[in-house]
Image: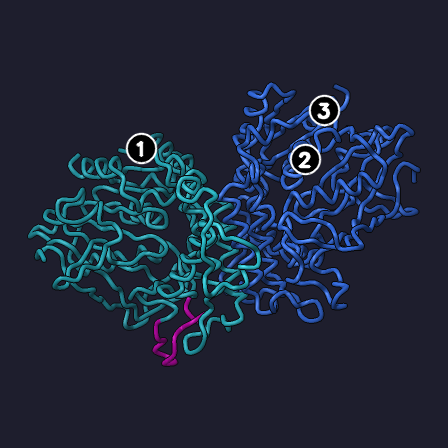
Chain colours: A blue, B cyan
Amino acid sequence: MTKNIPSTIKYYVFSKDKDFQLDSGLKFGPITVAYETFGELNENKDNAVLVIHALTANTHVCSHYDKDRKTEGWWDNIAGPNKPIDTKKYFVICSNYLGGCYGTTGPSSINPDTGRPFGLDFPIITVRDMVKVQKKLIDHLGIKKLKLVLGGSLGGMQVLEWSVLYPDSLERAIVIASAYKTSPQVIAFGEVGRYAIMSDDNFNNGNYYNSKLPEKGLSIARMIAHITYLSKEAMELKFGRDIKGEILETDKLHGIFGPMFQVESYLRYQGQKFVQRFDANTYIYITKAMDMYDLTKDRENISHALSSVKCKMLVVSFTSDWHFRPSESWEIVKVMMNLKKEVSYVNIDSDYGHDAFLIKNDEMEKIIASYLKF
Amino acid sequence: MTKNIPSTIKYYVFSKDKDFQLDSGLKFGPITVAYETFGELNENKDNAVLVIHALTANTHVCSHYDKDRKTEGWWDNIAGPNKPIDTKKYFVICSNYLGGCYGTTGPSSINPDTGRPFGLDFPIITVRDMVKVQKKLIDHLGIKKLKLVLGGSLGGMQVLEWSVLYPDSLERAIVIASAYKTSPQVIAFGEVGRYAIMSDDNFNNGNYYNSKLPEKGLSIARMIAHITYLSKEAMELKFGRDIKGEILETDKLHGIFGPMFQVESYLRYQGQKFVQRFDANTYIYITKAMDMYDLTKDRENISHALSSVKCKMLVVSFTSDWHFRPSESWEIVKVMMNLKKEVSYVNIDSDYGHDAFLIKNDEMEKIIASYLKF
């Protein structure tokens, strides 16, 4: 266990007076932010990298060793000792977003006014709110300027907001597999997922914490999402039309419809695994925040919105990503170029679809490593 | 009301001895086939065109006038008086598939052995079974050779099977927006839909006919399917990120998550409309048959399978169809060309995705009209 891999999740509590101004106009608090850091902050506090996680991830970016027990990080190929974001050199921070279920205040947190989980009494939050909460944490850590802010998908949207809201607080930004506003197709898939959760008889208007969970609905939402994360090509390569021999014990009913495809079995498994680790209300709140996201909201247009950017920006997309298409990344790049901003763009050749940013990829690793030195 | 637009659905009953051989090995019967015909069969019985409907359509290809009341046909731009398939000249037949809920024997039909609807006691059926049932109907009508067999999507799969199973019984075939086997992505979406239906508390192991219907599950399945029928471009054009002002009366819960997008509202509406007209068990049986479909099953390979084809074949795809991609149509064409069969291929430029074959399209109309004369 090396000392530059810290071991525990930390918490920062603020807005004890309930004065945190939400995008919706409401004031809210107290807010607990769960975060992890990896590596050490130097004396000048100028080696900090903020990694922003996507929809269903958590603060655990890098692997962690507790004695001999290793808990895998979700971005081990990118961040860690001797990795592109080298934690021997950089201080990596990752916080769970507002509304989350991995430590930060969210719908499953106890509402201090009632002593019960918020459920649907949790206020509506936006991507901008998530970023404002992160900024509070960065201020708390005494960091004036981040070396780099980066993230994929929902994380990438937050990177964009960072670069616009706090132009003096970051030196570089990497926006991966993302968009400056959500496409109607992404909204549509999001909506079906939310509808499935709310249609689950166990949902009970969001008050399910002391009874049966809306597992079927959340499982359906996850299955749909999983399809959108994989490319058609990746599915061909990974599953083809292979048949799974055995029929799941829990799935006698399916059995009557003959053999089950590997891809069906895989999706069922992904759905079942997900419900054990994720809160259904958080899923609803955060997908809705993602679907509502539009960088131009309360700003004249995209050109006006990006005009305040001061950092260097790298935009990365993946050829087979049909959920957040390369053309959506290119939209950002074009505007930045027209504004004569320092922007770079890479469309990485990959068969893995939207998931590509979470999968080991030599090109992405090289690009991120060199961008930090650039 | 012109006399070449017939008015009523007809029924043909066969296999009263339960001797119809299913693909699964089981014998089944009696089978009622619901069908409609438009135009008149000529004396030589050589002007018949078999239109095969897709997953959720029915026998009602052409508009029908009952006194002054018009019931729209689902393919009015293609078939009807003075249309590309001119019912003044051709005798158009369309039957509901085996397992259906529009008149042909299916899971919602009464099981003569029990006096109750079959439900999940209905046997597993395949695309090949559907075609064999259609052939019984064509024999019954005394037609030796069909002038043309055509259909889109699931209909296209049946056209392929027709051309292989009964090479001497058709002169021409048009396979539209289809494939010779279902891709894992289509299977994956199908699986989530089936899972949603079976997860509905009202599903009750398929025995819901005398109680509450699994409307939520079927609605979710339909919403998912609808997204796959539209292209990303079509969604941009049709909905963009437009907001629907009012909140549905039935949807107070959604209201707390702020405004609703047009695309969300549209999907909800499509889901709700569908459950009033379609049987959930049929949806499960037929999507599973579709997902299991592979022309090469029990045949050596695709080249071997298509080697028996004797008809002229036209394959049509649409540029923006990501559910059944042009490349999947092209696969069929390539093999047919290698086999030196009479095959033509058109990839029609359209923004409408998989739905394009059901939408008015000048190019498709011209191509079908000229292919009949060719």
Which image quadrant for residue B32? bottom left
Residue B81 image point, x, y percent: 13, 48
Q: Residue furthest bottom?
A: B115
Residue A366, disc: 3
Q: Chain for mark 3?
A: A
Residue B330 left/right relative to A17: left
Same chain, marks 1 and 2? no
Q: How many numbered dots are placed on residues in this image?
A: 3
Which residue is the site of mark 1?
A: B345
Amino acid on which disc 2 is placed: Leu
Cα distance in 3D space between marks 1 and 2: 53 Å
Residue A165, disc: 2
Amino acid on which disc 3 is placed: Lys
Q: Earlier in the sequence, mark 2 or mark 3?
A: 2
Please give the name of the residue rendered at 47% of the width and 71% of the height, measured from the top-left corner.
B206
Residue B72 left/right relative to B227: left
Observer-side mark, 3 or 1, equals 3
Q: Chain for mark 1?
A: B
Cα distance in 3D space between marks 3 and 1: 44 Å
Same chain, marks 2 and 3? yes
What range of the chain is rendered magenta?
Answer: B109-123
